Structure formats: structure tokens, C-alpha cells
Amino acid sequence: MLSDGFLHRLDALRLTARSPAQGGAGGLRRSKALGTSVEFSDFREYAPGDDLRRLDWNAYARFDRLFLKLFMEEQETQVNLLVDASASMGERDKWPFARDLAALLAYLALRGGDRVTMYALGGGERHSASLSGRAGYMRAAEFLDALTPAGETRLCADIARLPLRPGRGISLLITDLMSPDGYEKALQSLQYRRQEAALLHVLSPWEMNPELQGMVRLVDSETGEERELSVTGSLLESYHRALSDLLRGAERFCHGRGMPYLRLTSDMDLEKEALRALSASGLVEA
Amino acid sequence: MHWLHPAGAWALLSLAAIAALYLLRRRSESHTVPSLLLWQRAVQEQQAMRPFQKLKKNILLFLQLALAALLAVSLMRPAVSGGVRGETVFVFDLSASMQTVEDGQSRLQEAQRRADALIDSMEPGDRVTVLAAGAQANIALSRSADLSRARAVIDGLRAGNGGADLPAAVSLAQAMARDIDGLNILVFSDTYAGADAQVIRVGQPAQNRALLSLSVGEGGQAFARVANYGDAASVTLECYADGNLCDMAAVEAGAGETVSALLQAPAGARTVQVKIAGEDALAADDSRWYAARSAASYRAVLCGDNLFLEKALSLRADLTLLRASVEEISDLTDIDLFIFDGALPETLPETGMLLCVAPTGTVLGVSPGETASASGALRAGAGDLAGRLTENLSLSDIALRRCTPLEGGEPVLTLGGKTLLAAAEADGRRAAVLGFDLHDSNLPLKGDFPVLIQNLLSWLLPDARSALADGVCGQTVALPADVRAQHARVITPSGRTLPAEGALEDTGEMGVYTLEYAYADGAVRSLPFAMHMDTDESDVRQVGPATGDVSLGGTAPAGMELTHWVLLALLALLLVEWGVSRRVG
């Protein structure tokens, strides 16, 4: 899936969380709670019963008063990777790209000490166990490897039924948005469930610019529905308008709700272009 | 409206071809796509514009069908004819240039079609006269109210290989017009430029090559001259000897140039034909023939001992001269000419020509008178024959001691109003009678004497070989008489047999004719000669102006060809189609 060299390069990166972790087990991500990490937070005067190991002796020497150094509590964050594994993702080389992208994000999350659960959408809900630690990456990879794109996408219905862990978390949705019931309610549902949602929109170059002309019979990969079309320049213009409406609508919806929106095409080089796009969108940081 | 080239309708098949292509194009190819979601939205948008889109979807098909239809119509050369009313004379140019083929039809065929269209526009009671202007102008149909017959007569006209006497035909029509009020005269021609009739021009400028001449030497060397009435080209000539290809030559001929070519035929070939290989607008002038003619030989018998006569007679190469006494001539046969110096036999020979010097009796109605002394100068007679027989004679310083004036016959030489040389012709026999003894004159010592004898021999025994020359189709050919022949006939190139009666008028066919003389002993002598297309008709690069569109009693008899308008519409439609195809993709 991802080469060892690439994984090694990913060690310098981490998944970005815009709000502190809350309620998780001890981890590497800052939380609102104060704790025992190495990251300094504040001073306060000593009160009897405080841990003497946290006294700032330099402050005592300077002010002749006892101050206690306070450090941030580092907690883990729940990262949910929602991967659209419907039949539409299996067309035009989208699936290998989406699968590797999910693996990349899982690695970054696990490498950052977060807990990861992977959900496959379409063709019946499937999800992995809650994964953590580096060892969790292997299980994540196995889960992704075992997936075969099939079935129909119903983003709203599928996501509404997902058994997400309660509490705050990060939910990254990888999909082509080819969902008859739309995507808006699905993303709203994630936000309602206190998830920092992000949309990674994966399309194939063919979908961006279909090379069709004349009389064609189009077969829907998910439903098997067929449609005879006379593809003319005019029809292609209408297609591009529909695609543009979809892309701009998704982008506008995500930005309106403070969600990162990232448009990726399956011909991108994951190690360079896709990673650069992830960094530029703020989803990944050094 | 009528069609000048109905065969162009075949192009309408392209409509079916285009429709078939569209039907074949409708076989759709199957593509699996991730989702039909976006396509359905695109189709919905299209359907929102359906009334326009439906038209747009098929507009290319309609435009292409319209283009093909217009192309077919333009190939059919549509024309509107104004028609003619009343009585009309159709004058047809049947010259060789009307055989020029353009767009698969000859100029005459185009003329016939246009004339047919005019006849179709005529009403019952209208009369038609058809004048065919070939080498001579002929009335093919006179004032007929039977329009279907008029069409048949017009359709039956064929262009000849010679020129056309159009002025004579138009004069004939104008003579009719003097008696018939409102007579329309329509001349269908490619070159006629007379202002005395309405000319319906047929034909377009075309390129042609023509063989202008061909001569063959005794060694078989054929010398041909080729005129190139067109763009510069390489002209290939083929030489056939007695029907077999024997040589080829290619010559470069610039535009409008006349070039020569030398080909080699076997010596002794009876017929040599040179042809221009390939096709051009006018095929009739692409061949030329040479027919070798063997010399005829005559037998003459001289009765009497006259050295002057003997010497003068021997100058004629094709004459075999025998000497005999008057008594011996009855034993001789196949004698073409009897020469009597003085005494005549008791009975003149029944056949053969006669040359009598100071005869003692009457010869073909010419009888000698009383012998008398002579004085004065000899003079030529007044008639044409006298002029011909005294051609190149000075008749000066000729002295006579005595003479015997002649009675009867046509005077050829006279002295003081009395005939001293008479020519007579009766029952196919000719006689020349001299009214003085050569020994009583200094004439034999003069240069005029052999000239006079040769002139007399030319009349008495014409050289058939030189008298018969190759000619141009349509011209009347004078056929030389063979005094010994019992029958003569002409065989045309197509094998028709015509009687040889002095002149041959039916010379429309091109090729080698054969004049055959049949003799009493069963022998046959053939004298071939060739008739060619009139090369004055070969230059078909230009056609004359048309005047047929001029209004004639409110009608335009020639009508107007609409092809250029159709082509303009086709061009405009092509631009529209190009624009639409770019927009539709």
C-alpha cells in the first residue's frame, strides 16, 4: 500500500486538530486539561498538598515565594476515517487512490497518538476496530486491503447510522460525492455529533473531462441503470456545468461550515501532489 | 424549368448515402461510468431547452441533405426556358465542332436538348421548321405542326465532320421570314456570330488537339503535323500501317503551338493511319489517313511516221506508246488513245480517245474543209476548254504554210476565225483534231508544241492519280473518269457502295474511300483516297457570344441556366453547415 520510505517521511507530519482533545485517554494531543506533559502552561502559587516536584525553584530564588509550574495535559483524539467504498469509487482508478489516501491519514493519526476507527460506506456499513499505536496501522491497512468497492452510496443515510464513539473527534470523509441523497445532511450530522469534519473529494480525470462523442450507452456502476445518450458538444457543456455546480456547491457548503474541503483527482501523485494539497488545506502539519 | 444534364440526378443517391451514414452512426457504444448522477443533470438541462435542441440535434443532417440535393441539382444544370410561340425555324449547326464533348454530352446533344425544351413549351398549332446546316444547308422539316415529329427530326440530327454553311441556312430562314409574319429564327451553334438571327449558344471553351496533315514518303516515312489547341502537353502519336501498330512518337506541344512529328511506317504500306493517343474534347480530328495510290498506265498507238509527235507523246511517263499502221489497228486491243497522223482507217475504232492530225475524214463530228493557204496568227478559242488546252502556250511566231479549217467541235485554236484545232466529246469519247499537217508548220519546232500535246493528253487521258486528291469531309470530290472502265464505284470507309458518277457528294464519313474501276476483262483497279475532318473546326477553345437570351416577343427562347445560382446557394449553405458543425461539435 504505502512504501516504508514514504511512511518514514510521514513521521515528520501529523494530523491537525483545530480544537483541543477532550475526554480521551492520555495521548500526544493537547487538551484543555492540565496534566503532566512537557508543555508549559502557566504558574500558580503553591498550595499545601501540591506535588513538590512541580515547584519552580528558580522563581522561589528570585521572588522568595513558592510557585508551581503547570503543564498541559496531553490526550488522544478519536479520528474517524469514513471511506466511500461504493461501486462508483471502483471506477476509473479512484479506489486505489482513495484507499492509499485513507491509509496515509490513518498512519498520520496513529503516528500522532490518536485513536483511529475506519468506516467503509456503501454496500453495507463496515468498520474497523478502534486502532491505536503504530501497530494499529497494520490493522488499518489490512482493513482497507480487504475492501472491494461495491454497492450504492447513500451518504446521508449511511453516516447517520454510523456508530461513532461519543465525544469530540475528527471525521475525515473520503468520497466522490456521487450520492443520490446528497452529502449536506451527512456532513451536518457529523458536526452535530461534535466531529471536526473534513471532506476529501476524490474524482477521476475522466469524470472531470469525459471523452465521449456521438451515440453512447452509459451504464451506472452502482445501479446498473443504462441510458442512451447522443453526446454532443452541447451535452458535454451541460455535463461540465453540472460538475461545476457539484464542486462549487460542496466547496461553498464546507467553507460555510468551517470544514476543510479538499478536491483531489486520482491521477495525483500521493507522495507529492496529494500530500502538498493536504498540507495546504491545513489538514496535515509538520 | 428543365434540365440541361439530367444525368446529374444520379448525385441524388448521395442523399441516401448520407441518411445511411446517420443511421449507421446511431449504433451506440457502451460505457460504464461511476454514476449517472451528473449525466442525468446534464440531460435535464438539455431537456429544458428541448424545442431548440431537437432542431439542433438534427440540423446537421438536414443541412447535409440539403447540400447533397443542391449539388445534384447543380449537376443537372437547371434552366428556365421562356419558350417560343408561333412559327419557329430551328437552325442547327452540324459542323464538326458540334461533336465536341463536354460533361459527357456533345454540343449538338446540348443543342438538341435545349431545342426539345423549347418545343415542349410550344402550343398546338405552332409550326416548326428545322434547317440542318452541314456542308450544305438542308431543310430537315418544313413548317410542321406535328411537334412530336419535330422533336424526332431534331433528335435525329447528327453532326458531320466538315464545316457548316450557316450563312446559307440563315439566309434560307430569312427568306421564309419574308413570307411569314412573326417567324422566329433560332440558331443553335457554338461559333455562329451573325447578327441576323438569335443565336442560342451551346458549348463551353474546351481543349483539343488535332492532326492537321499527314504525308508519307516512298520509304514509309510519315510526317505529321499536330496542333495543340489547349494547355501545353505531351502528345503521343501512334502510327498504324494497314491496321497494325508500327510506330509511336511523343512530341511536346506548347499551348496553341503546332508541332511536327516523324514516324516510320513500312515501305509499301497501302494505308497509313496516324492517331493521337488519349482523349480530348473532339475525337474526330485525332486521326488522319494516307492512302498510297498506284499509278495508272495508258496504252496509245501512233499511226503514221511523225517523229515530232512521237517525241512529244513520249514525255508522258504513264503512257505506253505503240506504233502501227492504219490497217493494223483493228488487231489491237486495250488501246486508250489512237493517234492518226493524216490518213484515217476506213472505220474508226469503237473505243478509245482520238488525236487526229490533218485527218482525211470526220472524227466525232469534226470534219475537215478545203485546204487553203494560211496567213495570220494562231489564237486560242474562247471557251473554258480552249483556255485549259492552250494553257501555258505563247502562240507567237507560229507560221503555217497551209491549213484545212475544221467544222464542228469546240474551237481550241483559230486562225482568222477558222478553227485549226477542235475538241469534241461524244458518248464518253473524246477527240482532238488538228486542222493542219505538222510538216506545214514550224509549230513542232517551238516550245509550245510539247506543252500543247501534254495539255491535249491531260484532257484525253487524265491522270487519275493526280486528279484524285484527299479532301475534307462534306466537300464534293471530282472522280476522274477511266476511259476503259466499264463500271466505277466508290466504297466508303464504312463499306457502303456508291455509284461513281463524275463527282461524289456523300463524303460525310472520315477515313479511306476506294474508287474502283471495273474493266471488261474482269480486271479491277482501285484508287483509294482519304477524307478528313475539317481542321478549321478543331479549335474549340472559344465559343461565340449568345444572343438567344434577348427578348423575343416577351419571351426568352433560350431561357436562363440557373446552375450558378444553385452553386451560390450551395456555397452559402456550406458556410452555414460549417458554422453549425463547429457549434454543435
Image: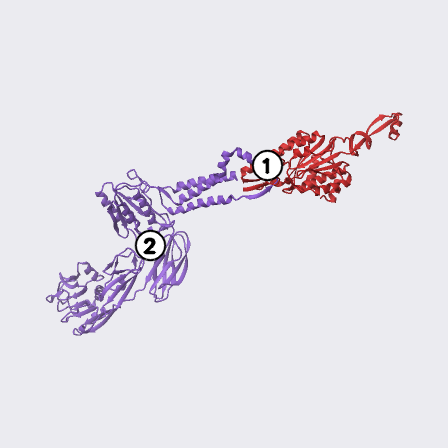
Please count the marks in the image. Answer: 2
Q: Residues within 10 Å of mark 1 (few under 14, many from 20)?
A: many
Specify the amino acid type for callout 1. Answer: Leu
Secondary structure of residue under mark 2 = helix
Q: Nearer the viewer, residue A1 or B278?
A: A1
Which one is earlier in the sequence, the residue at label 2 or at label 1? 1
Left or right of residue B438, residue A243 in this image: right
Q: Is residue B290 above or below residue B131?
A: below
Query: Is the C-beta separation of discs 2 and 1 under 8 Å?
Result: no
Label 1 marks a residue whose chain is B
Q: Which residue is mark 1?
A: B38
Q: Quadrant of the N terminus of chain A?
A: top right
Chain B colour in the picture: purple
Q: Position of residue B260 (x, y in %)?
A: 38, 58
Tell me which corner region of the image, top left, top right, bottom left or bottom right, holds residue B127. top left
| Chain in red (letter) | A
